[in-house]
Amino acid sequence: MNPDQLDMQAVVCHGPKDYRLQTIKRPVPGARELLIRIAACGICASDCKCHSGAAMFWGGDGQPAWVKPPVVPGHEFFGYVVEAGEGGEAHFGVQIGERIIAEQIVPCEKCRFCKSGKYWMCEVHNIFGFQRDVADGGMAQFMRIPPSALVHKIPDAISLEDAAIIEPMACAIHTVNRAEVQLDDVVVIAGAGPLGLMMVQIAHLKSPKKLVVIDLVPERLALARQFGADVVIDPTKEDALAIIRGLTDGYGCDVYIETTGAPAGVTQGLNLIRKLGRFVEFSVFGKETSADWSIIGDRKELDVRGAHLGPYCYPVAIDLFERGLITSTGIVTHDFPLDDWEQAFALANSTDSIKVLLKPRAD
C-alpha cells in the first residue's frame, strides 16, 4: 500500500447486518483503469436484502454465496473521471472530467457466455458491490473501474437524478424486451416499486393494447398512471382476476411481468395469464418461492422467461433519457450523504420511499 495514498469515506459490508461507515484507502487506478468520483449511488432492493441477510446472497439454504466480504456495496452508481492509469482514457474512450457509468457486471471475457456475446450471464459473474475480486462498489467517495468493465459516457444534458437510475432503467428495458410486447397485448406489471415504475415507462413506449399495473401502495399506483398505465389495481381492494378477465374476454393477460419480489406475485401471475402467455420473472427473492408447475405445463403451456441485468440496454436508456422519453421524476424520492447510510437503507427498505440515493461528499 502506498503510504501517500489518500483516504476516503465508504460504507463497507462485513457480513449480514454488519455494514459500517469507514475511512479506507482511496483506490489507485492501474494500467487501462479509471478512478471516478461517485456522484450518486442508488440503493437497490437487492442491497437491502443483502444487508438483511437473505439466503440467496450469503449461501444459506444450500444456495451459492454471492457476497464476499469485506466489500464496498453499490452497483447503481455513476461518477466523474478524476484520474486514469496508463492508457486508461484511450482504453475506455473517455477523458478526465467526463461523466461515466459502468455496467454492474464485470465480464471475465473467457467463459462460454462472454465469448458468445452473452456477457451478462458470465460464469464467473463478478458484480460491483458484491465481490471485490475486480473492484469495490459505489457506496464510497471514489471507485476504481477495472479494464474489463463496460463503460458508457453520460451526456451533460441528463440530470443527476436521471443519471443515477440508468442502471435499473437498463434492467427495466431488458425485462420489457424479454416480454416481446405486441401492439394488441394486454400487459400486466406486478409491482410498482422503482423497477416496476421504470418498466411501466418502457412498456408504455411499446404501445400495448392495455397496460395494467398491480400494487398495494396508492401513491405508486397514481405514479404508474402518470407513466402510462391504463388500469391500476390494488389487489387487497379489487378483484384482479375479474378485472383482467374483463379486459380480455375472459382469457387472461398476454404478458405478465413479475417484479414484486414476493411469492404472491408469482402465484398471482400464473392465475392472471392466459394460455400460451409470456411470463417474465425479474425479481430477486429473499427465499425460495414455490408454485404449481402444472399450471405452467399441463394447463397453460406458458412461455416462462427470466430477466437478468441490463445487457446492451445502457446506450438505449441513455438515449431515452436524453430525448426526454423517460424520467426519474417521482421515482427518485430521497437522497442522503454517506454519513446517514443507515437511515437511507431503512427508508429504502420501506414503502415510504421509492428510490433512495447516497451522495458522497465531493472532497
Image (cartoon, rainbow, N blue to C red):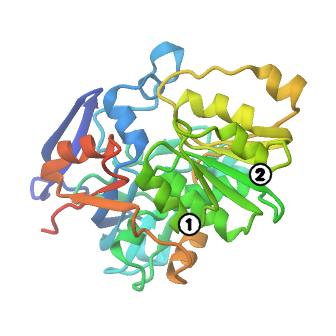
Number of labelled discs?
2
Residue at left offset 44%, top offset 82%: 155
Which residue has dot 1 on it? 314
Q: Nearer the viewer, mark 1 or mark 2?
A: 2
Quadrant of residue 29 in the image?
bottom left
Q: Amino acid at mark 2?
A: Leu
Where is residue 211 shown, x and y percent of the image?
A: 68, 58
Pick the front one: 250 or 1? 250
Q: SS of the residue at dot 1? A: helix
The numbered mark, 1 or 2, whose residue comes first in the sequence reads 2
Q: Position of residue 345 (x, y in %)?
A: 26, 43
Instruction: Name above or below for residue 188 compared with residue 70.
Output: below
- 302 lies left or right of 74: right
Left or right of 56? Residue 233 is: right
The percent coordinates of residue 143 (x first, y second) are 30, 58
The image shows residue 66 at horizontal and vertical percentages of 46, 31
Q: Which residue is mark 2?
A: 247
Residue located farthest toward the top when viewing the structure as drawn: 61
